[in-house]
Image (cartoon, helix red, strand yellow):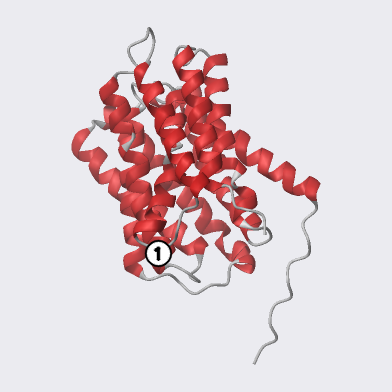
Amino acid sequence: MPAPAPPHPPLSPSLLAALVTLLCLIWGSTWWAIRLCLHDQPPLWSAALRFLVAGLALTVLLPALRRIDRGPAPPRWLWLAAGATNFAGSYGVLYVAEQHVPSGLAAVLWSVFPLLMALSGVLVLGERLRTLQWLGFAVSFVGIVVVFAGTGDDGAAPLGACLLLLLSPLVSAIGTTLIKKFGHGSSSLQLNRNGMLTGAVLLLVAAALREPWSAMRWSMSGTLALVYLALVGTALTFGVYFWLLQRVEASRLALISYVTPVLAVVLGVLVGDGASTASLWLGTALVTAGVALVVRRPKA
């Protein structure tokens, strides 16, 4: 019997802070990058190409990354489900909706994902919520109401597009719940790589049926944004996040969940993507505070 693998050496606080900051900055910028893509690219084609490039990049990197992920291959049905929900379904909806929803507002609406996962833990995984977590749900709900109250302001997104966007985190939460329930111990690398490529194929089929390829325009900004989303916003960040999960508790990475939308709102305002309204800032603050209460873990 082979000797068990030695534990990972402790991660220095400075390196952890630097990597978490990197993830927050990158994921905070991806919302605007999607908007840049959508200036020139039909939404389904753009999403499909993103995950096709990212999945192929992970395929190339998989032999090296397998040194830190030696789990068995996930069941085929699970990565097919992940591809249909977490990638094709969730991002297909997101890209279509973000044609009309500014990047910062999109990030705030999508930040309900941790709330949905906490709720799925209660309904499906047998978990229990503390009083502060229920308070977090209430605070976030008020924040979403405030955000929607401002959708009629000048420069704000149409209400229908905002409601459509909320389907994206819901679909993703369904897929993630399946992964949490049935994917424990499986190779996260293979699951995500296979899911990305499956999602890319499904999105390519949908794009071919609904969007003319001739509508694709290969401007410098759109092409660079697409490459950035695929290689940096997907493949790189996934690798860094997975590497961190091997070395620190998941609860210590919760900061990413409620810093990212704030950064996305700030960036959107700075680049002129959407109006800076009082309802957007107040709603962002309330949603962020609520998510922080839900994902925060009590001290031992």
Q: Secondary structure at mark 1?
A: loop
* Quadrant assignment, res 165: top left
Q: Position of residue 216 (x, y in %)?
A: 34, 27
Amino acid at pointer 1: Gly
Q: Nearest the camera: 186 or 298?
A: 298
Residue 40 is at least partly visible in this image: no
Coordinates of residue 135 in the picture (x, y in percent)? 47, 40
Q: Is residue 214 left or right of residue 61?
A: left
Give the quadrant of residue 149: top left
296 relative to 249, above or below: above
252 sits to left or right of 88: right
**Residue furthest front in the image:** 131
x, y percent for residue 41: 36, 27
Quarter of the image for the N terminus: give it: bottom right
Crowdedness near tag 1: few (<14), some (14–19) or many (≥20) residues, C-alpha within 10 Å: few
Q: Quadrant of the C terminus?
A: bottom right
In the rendered image, is residue 150 in sight?
yes
Up-down relation of residue 258 to residue 184 (above or below): above
Q: Furthest-bottom residue in view?
A: 1
For label 1, the residue is 126
Residue ID at (80%, 53%): 12
Residue appearing at x 39%, y 57% in the figure: 122
In this rendering, the answer to whether 206 lies above or below 224 is below
